[in-house]
Image (cartoon, helix red, strand yellow):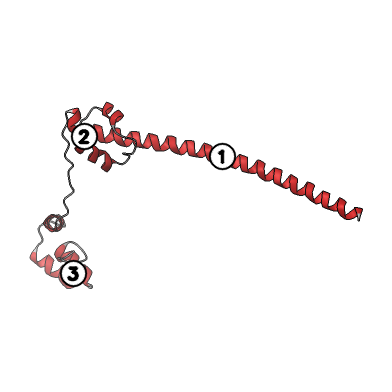
Amino acid sequence: MSDVGFELDDENDDSSNVLKELRKAYKAKEKQVKELEEQLNQIQGAARQTTVEGVLTEAGIDSRVARFIPDSVTTSDEVHEWLTENGELFGVSVTKVEAESSDAVKAAARIASVADAGGPVDPGDMASRLAGANTEAELNMILFGNETGPVG
């Protein structure tokens, strides 16, 4: 019976060593996580600073205004929005330029790309090119300057 008790004590020693090793590994991982979080915060702070100062410089505003922009404002869109709301406090007026994506703009771009597709073509040459086209895509390239035709 004393042999059984001795074996149990050995098992407890092994498990306590395992627990010590696990605790040690856990502390090491906690330290590593803390270091990585600090690095992440530094990188995010630097990225935010670069974004904010870039937007301010683009808008022709003194970069010292960045001190007054809240830390929660991180993207260029948020900076533009903040400047639109609060710019008058610093004596600047900022209007965000919206990207035009109307159908008229897209149509004008298509027309311009067709016009740039090639120079003047000899009618005889055009007829031979049309006769030599084997696929619909080739015909569209000859006639419209793209593979999808007049629509796309």
Return the residue nearer the eye: 134 or 13: 13
Distance from disc 3 to disc 2, alpha carbons, whole Å, reads: 55 Å
The residue under the point 11% across, 57% down is: 104
Question: Which circle marks residue 2 in the picture?
Answer: none
Q: Residues within 10 Å of mark 3 (few under 14, many from 20)?
A: many
The residue under the point 30% across, 35% down is: 52
Pinpoint residue 74: horizontal percent, then vertical percent.
33, 39
Name the residue that disc number 3 marks. Answer: 139
Q: Looking at the rendering, which quadrant does residue 95 occupy?
A: top left
Q: Secondary structure at mark 3?
A: helix
Name the residue that disc number 1 marks. Answer: 32
The residue under the point 19% across, 30% down is: 89
Q: Secondary structure at mark 2?
A: helix
Pinpoint residue 130: horizontal percent, then vertical percent.
15, 70
- The amino acid marked with disc number 2 is Asn
Q: Nearer the viewer, mark 3 or mark 1?
A: 1
- The amino acid marked with disc number 1 is Gln
Name the residue that disc number 2 marks. Answer: 86
Q: Looking at the rendering, which quadrant does residue 69 occupy?
A: top left
- For marks 3 and 1, the one nearer the N-term is 1
The residue under the point 28% across, 30% down is: 68
Distance from disc 2 to disc 1, alpha carbons, whole Å, reads: 41 Å
